[in-house]
Amino acid sequence: MPELPEVETTRRMIAPYLEGQTLKSLVYDPSSRYQNLDLALGKKVKRLERRGKYLIAIFEGDKLELIVHLGMTGGFRFEGSSHTRVTVTTEQGTLYFQDSRRFGKWIVVAAGDYSSMPTLHGMGPEPLSSDFDLADFVDAASSCGTVKPWLLSQKPVAGLGNIYVDEALFLAKIHPQSVRLSKEQATKLHAAIIQVLTRAVEVGGSTLSDKTYQQLDGQTGYFQLEHRVYAREGQPCVVCGTPLEKIWLGGRGTHFCSSCQVLGA
């Protein structure tokens, strides 16, 4: 599933085709996953924002917003295909939303009304903004449950998914099953989250072996070339050489180094 770096890369690439533009046409599959889109027709996009893993088109007048979640396989292209679910046309051209597994979601809502989207409604601070306060994070982490599911919940910080949680925990040398982090651990994790996400955004996110995430022009991201643990089970740790492990935690494949990330350390 696209995480913050992939969604931010997408936002930056499609913004020139939407910001300041009027939505002339919206063609979409008849599905409950696409709601109230006709309300967006003829509206002018004031700006395109990102909140966690969500794209938010703010319309002029500030009364309506178009919320887009890419789901597991969603992304925008310049050309349509058999997997095109939504086609958006402005004076700048046409964008095609592809989604092979059909988990993406588009919905027009009253500005700021996220009551139908609990994850977005209760989302924590943006990690690449000043809202990601160290003291607040340290305090919350001191009583957290198992750290990986806690981070995936989106409540302590927005936008992290399986890839970047594994990578940040490795960089901070914290075992994914750790609970109630010390001040030192939480401080290192706070810095690691920022470092990992900043770098991933710089290089366009991660394109995995299934190739479902690509940039608007079809190019891949490049952060997968820098993964230290994610999807590298059985391979040597880049720090100590110990074979990396994979366990299932909260239903998610979890990658770590048992030597660098010692439980209870």
Image: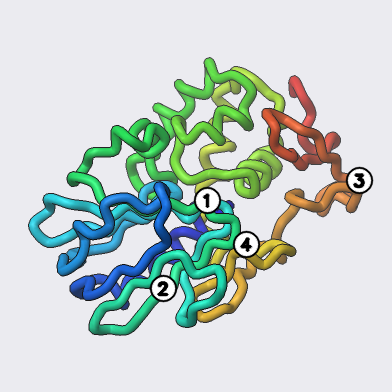
In the drawing, does residue 161 fall left or right of residue 41? Answer: right
**Above or below — where is 48 with respect to 244?**
below
Amino acid beneath label 2: Met
Assign a secondary structure to mark 1. Answer: loop
The residue located at (17%, 60%) in the rendering is: 59
**Above or below — where is 14 with respect to 39?**
below
Amino acid beneath label 4: Ser
Residue 83, x across and y down, in percent: 55, 68
Residue 23, x across and y down, in percent: 23, 71
The CA span between labels 3 and 2 is: 38 Å
| Residue 196, visible in the rendered structure | no
The residue located at (51%, 58%) in the rendering is: 5
Considering only order in the chain, which callout, 1 or 4, is on the residue closer to the N terminus?
1
The residue mark sitting in front, 3 or 4, is 4
The residue located at (48%, 76%) in the rendering is: 77
Assign a secondary structure to mark 3. Answer: loop
The residue mark sitting in front, 4 or 1, is 1
Q: Which mark is residue 243?
A: 3
Name the residue nearer the viewer: 96 or 147: 96
Residue at the disc numbered 4: 206
Residue at the disc numbered 1: 103
Name the residue nearer the viewer: 111 or 137: 111
Assign a secondary structure to mark 4. Answer: loop
